Image: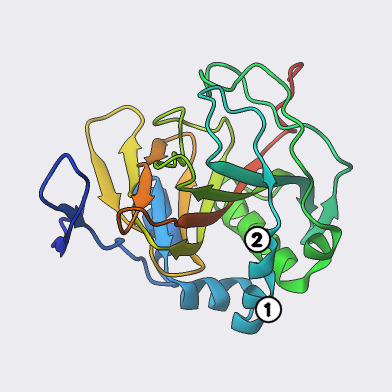
Amino acid sequence: MQVMRPRDYARGFSSCRFAAVFSPPFSTADRYLDDLAARGFAVLDAASVRTLSGATAPGLAALLPDWDQLAPDEYLKDGGRYRQRRHASFIVQGGEVRDVPYRPHWQPLDYNALHGGMQRWFAPVASATLAHADWRALLRWLARVANALRGTQPWYGEAHQFRIDTTDGIGRPTPEGAHRDGVDLVAVFLVARQAIKGGETRVFELDGPKGQRFTLEQPWSVLLMDDLRVIHESTPIQPAEEGGHGHRDTLVVTLRAGGFLDPGA
């Protein structure tokens, strides 16, 4: 995989003098599907996301206040208060997005040893957000990516708005560690980073030794992953300044063929 030059990240984690921050290995809009097929993941900058999805910069900016209205995650088994989120389910077929009535998020223990095996009823995504043209443009585009990856078919999707903050001193984007989601396609959009350090993204081959680490910093840049081929995680975040407070906002969208992950699936 590509070797990238780190830049010094001054005053890093307390366990070391500094932490290196690696730039994302961005694909171009005309090559990202080839990269996704070749290595199991691809990263796109915000301009490419807009070009490919048809979303607009003003439209995506209009979604940002949503992340100030997320609800606490009441299911964290580590007792943390650092995660807020909302959740929605949908189906994309024939280029049309159909919202699905409120339903729980469920994963088997095989995919999430920490929080799997239970139905988690998260607060729903706001109805105005679900109806927003740019939100739906992103979902339609991701369905086209999934079609290119697996063939044209209906896609059963879930969208998760996340805010990880430093209320507890450290916030953990993936407390379950490196994992798969049990779907076909995973998209992780970086929405915002505010006054934090850490939050490094790590992607590893599922059945091999190779991996890559980088930090998403550009709002609405995205990591696309073939969930059958890679596992992923994000490292904890800390305040950028001692005694400060910060957060990391993301939109995670998953698409699965054949139906939603449910206890009876």
Which residue was labeled with disc 1? 59
Residue at the (52%, 32%) spot, across then down: 80
Instruction: Assign a secondary structure to mark 2.
Output: helix
Towards the viewer: 258 or 54: 54
**Can residue 217 be seen in this snapshot?**
yes
Find residue 13 and report its horizontal and vertical position in percent. 22, 46
Q: Residue 207's quadrant in the figure?
A: top left
- Residue receiving disc 2: 68
Residue 227 x, y percent position in the rendering: 49, 38
Q: Residue at x 48, y 55 (%)?
A: 247
Residue 161 spot, x, y in % from top left: 64, 51
Q: Which mark is residue 241?
A: none
Name, please, the residue furthest toward the left. Answer: 17
**Upstream in the sequence, badge 2 or badge 1?**
1
Q: How many marks?
A: 2
Q: Is residue 126 above or below residue 263?
A: below
| Residue furthest front as drawn | 243
Q: Disc 2 marks which amino acid?
A: Asp
